[in-house]
Image (tube, rainbow, N blue to C red):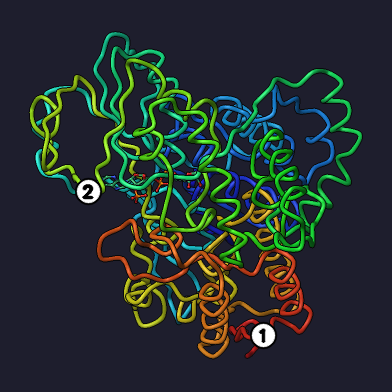
């Protein structure tokens, strides 16, 4: 058998984005597609993040594909927020149902991709020695896939076990009777804290920045819940495609200050009791735009923290201050704050008293020494750009993407980069991506890219590239909107602040889905305005 080495499309990654891209390009466009995936299974984020308590913060029935009504009808979610194994099972089901596995090469990391100006094709290399060519290269690498390991001296000297939430082992980890140190209080650390505390002899949580976490209010679905969801699916999916952030919440245009204080409190109480992201997106329209409105929601959450955590000093340490609610990705939790009422759990503020060194028996901050059997790092990711830049992607004239983005990522619509023809970045920086319910953002991007590939084929073009002018204008627009929002007022991974030396740039598009979709559609309808089309097949 001759090994195939030339494709219409190479897709990098087999998570939510890569699986749908493969299905769309192969089964709808009848293209020859190869997917490369680092993991030895499909699932992307939901393959790697297996830490205790790993659960989706969006609700199961809309954190899923909408492209196949049959799939939506046949799959049964067990409850409101699925845990990692259930989403991994779902993505494996999708892989088999649409016969995707045969075009996915697992356990293979793409290491380099180079564009050839003469042939208008990409050459893609992997750590398994593959060197294949493809007309189009589509990255489906995820926005939170390059784990960030903090540069704390002494890590190699630690005699106990070290785990990272982002690469948690497949085999169960038994923490019974162990003294555990957990570093990081983002979504992962906040989800992992209660189950680790329930098992370990002692848990010490090291917190640099407190977070505004909201209760999930998880519950199992009853059969009538399933029936209701399935009956409403058309409307649910329509709403996800129309709403600001891809959630099926009916749009609100109510401003916080327009509502009398008592009524406001009642609305917030209702949202708090309901649980989940609706607190941010389903109550008031201005929480991420108006600092005064935001402070009302922020103080509401602080009050809840103070009511929940019995030790006033710990409660105060857990209360976020100095940045607006939502400007860092807000976690959704199950019993996070309650866990600090346990006798075996303590909180250490490392903002004022940073970790100086990991020792063979634990770690030392500026003022104290701690002993552990196990260290857990929940320290996040080199978000949005890390997973792209760790591949050596080179565009025209051999320019590396890392050079093109040395001052921060610049894209046209988050879909393409000037100087990198025939490269498409699913949920790339400059698109709403991480500020949306991801499967909705992914489907919109894959559908748009598929439409574009079909157009190029029909018109006989073999090359498409964002123009510098279109990219400059888009980058400026993204920055302007970002600067006018509250997102830039926190040191978050949205602005690259969690990685030392990373340029501080607002990476996601903050204008919301409706405006973004409208713009993408208008670009398409104008014959791919802002893109230069070319290639020998069209004689252009
Ligand atoms: P996050 O949200 O980036 O959280 C990482 C946490 O680790 C956060 O509390 C950081 O504090 C902390 N951190 C990072 N580096 C250090 C060092 N060097 N020392 C101490 N503490 C540190 O990542 P997650 O995995 O929790 O969540 C990622 C996304 O997954 C989440 O947003 C959802 O979209 C799902 P900081 O806040 O930077 O002060």
Image-based side of 155 in relation to 436, left or right: left
Residue at 52 percent across and 25 percent down: it is 335
Placement of 182 over or under 245, stated as above or below? above
* Quadrant of the image containing the C terminus: bottom right
Q: Position of residue 136 (x, y in %)?
A: 55, 66
User: Which residue, given by chain and number where applicable, does mark 2 sit on?
Assistant: 352
Q: Position of residue 164 (x, y in %)?
A: 32, 34
Q: Nearer the viewer, residue 115 or 452?
A: 452
Alpha carbon separation for disc pair 1 and 2: 62 Å
The disc placed on residue 310 is none
Q: Nearer the viewer, residue 289 or 464?
A: 289
In terms of secondary structure, where does tag 2 sit?
Answer: loop
Ligand 1 neighbours mark 2 (CB distance < 8 Å): no
Placement of 477 over or under 5, stated as above or below? below
Residue 132 seen in render: no
Farthest residue to the right: give it.
Answer: 231
Q: Decide: marks 1, 2 in contact (CB < 8 A)?
A: no
Q: Return the disc, 1 or 2, that comes first in the chain's sequence.
A: 2
Residue 211 placement: quadrant: top left
Q: Nearer the viewer, residue 332 or 462?
A: 332
Residue at 39 percent across and 39 percent down: it is 316
Image-based side of 215 in relation to 23, left or right: left
Foreground disc of the pair 1, 2: 2
Residue 69 seen in render: yes
Placement of 205 over or under 374, stated as above or below? below
Q: Residues within 10 Å of mark 2 (few under 14, many from 20)?
A: few
User: Which residue, given by chain and number where applicable, does mark 1 sit on?
Assistant: 538
Ligand 1 neighbours mark 1 (CB distance < 8 Å): no
Image-based side of 252 in relation to 192, left or right: right
Q: Residues within 10 Å of mark 1 (few under 14, many from 20)?
A: some
Residue at 70 percent across and 65 percent down: it is 448
């Amino acid at each position: 058998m001759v090994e195939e080495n030339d494709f219409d499309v190479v897709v990098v990654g087999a998570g939510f984005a890569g699986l749908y891209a493969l299905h769309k390009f192969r089964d709808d466009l009848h293209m020859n597609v190869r997917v490369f995936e680092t993991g030895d299974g499909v699932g992307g984020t939901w393959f790697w993040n297996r830490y205790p308590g790993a659960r989706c913060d969006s609700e199961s029935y809309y954190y899923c594909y909408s492209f196949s009504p049959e799939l939506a009808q046949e799959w049964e979610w067990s409850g409101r927020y699925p845990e990692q194994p259930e989403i991994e099972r779902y993505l494996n089901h999708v892989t088999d149902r649409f016969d995707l596995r045969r075009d996915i090469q697992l356990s293979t990391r793409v290491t380099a991709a180079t564009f050839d100006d003469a042939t208008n094709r990409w050459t893609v290399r992997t750590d398994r020695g593959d060197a294949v060519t493809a007309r189009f290269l589509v990255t489906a690498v995820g926005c939170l896939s390059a784990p960030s390991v903090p540069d704390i001296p002494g890590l190699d000297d630690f005699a106990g076990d070290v785990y990272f939430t982002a690469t948690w082992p497949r085999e169960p980890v038994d923490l019974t009777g162990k003294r555990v140190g957990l570093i990081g209080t983002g979504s992962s650390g906040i989800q992992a804290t209660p189950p680790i505390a329930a098992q370990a002899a002692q848990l010490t949580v090291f917190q640099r920045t407190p977070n505004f976490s909201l209760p999930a209010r998880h519950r199992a679905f009853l059969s009538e819940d399933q029936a209701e969801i399935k009956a409403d699916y058309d409307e649910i999916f329509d709403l996800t495609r129309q709403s600001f952030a891809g959630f099926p919440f009916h749009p609100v245009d109510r401003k916080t200050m327009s509502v009398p204080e008592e009524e406001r409190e009642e609305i917030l109480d209702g949202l708090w009791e309901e649980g989940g992201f609706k607190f941010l997106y389903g109550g008031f329209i201005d929480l991420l735009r108006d600092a005064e409105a935001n402070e009302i929601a922020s103080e509401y959450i602080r009050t809840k923290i103070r009511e929940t955590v019995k030790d006033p000093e710990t409660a105060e340490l857990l209360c976020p201050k100095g940045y607006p609610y939502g400007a860092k990705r807000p976690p959704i939790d199950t019993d996070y704050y309650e866990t600090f009422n346990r006798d075996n759990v303590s909180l250490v503020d490392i903002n004022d008293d940073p970790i100086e060194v990991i020792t063979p028996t634990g770690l030392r901050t500026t003022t104290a020494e701690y002993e552990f059997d196990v260290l857990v790092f929940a320290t996040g990711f080199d978000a949005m750009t890390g997973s792209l830049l760790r591949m050596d992607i080179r565009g025209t004239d051999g320019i590396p993407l890392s050079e093109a983005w040395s001052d921060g990522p610049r894209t046209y619509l988050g879909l393409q980069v000037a100087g990198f023809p025939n490269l498409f970045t699913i949920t790339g920086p400059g698109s709403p991506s991480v500020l949306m319910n991801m499967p909705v953002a992914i489907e919109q991007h894959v559908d748009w890219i598929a439409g574009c590939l079909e157009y190029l084929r029909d018109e006989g073009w073999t090359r498409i590239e964002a123009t510098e002018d279109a990219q400059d204008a888009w980058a400026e627009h993204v920055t302007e909107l970002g600067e006018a929002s509250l997102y830039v007022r926190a040191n978050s991974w949205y602005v690259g602040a969690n990685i030392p030396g990373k340029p501080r740039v607002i990476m996601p598009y903050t204008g919301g889905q409706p405006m973004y979709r409208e713009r993408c559609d208008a670009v398409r309808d104008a014959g791919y305005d802002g893109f230069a089309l070319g290639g020998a097949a069209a004689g252009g």
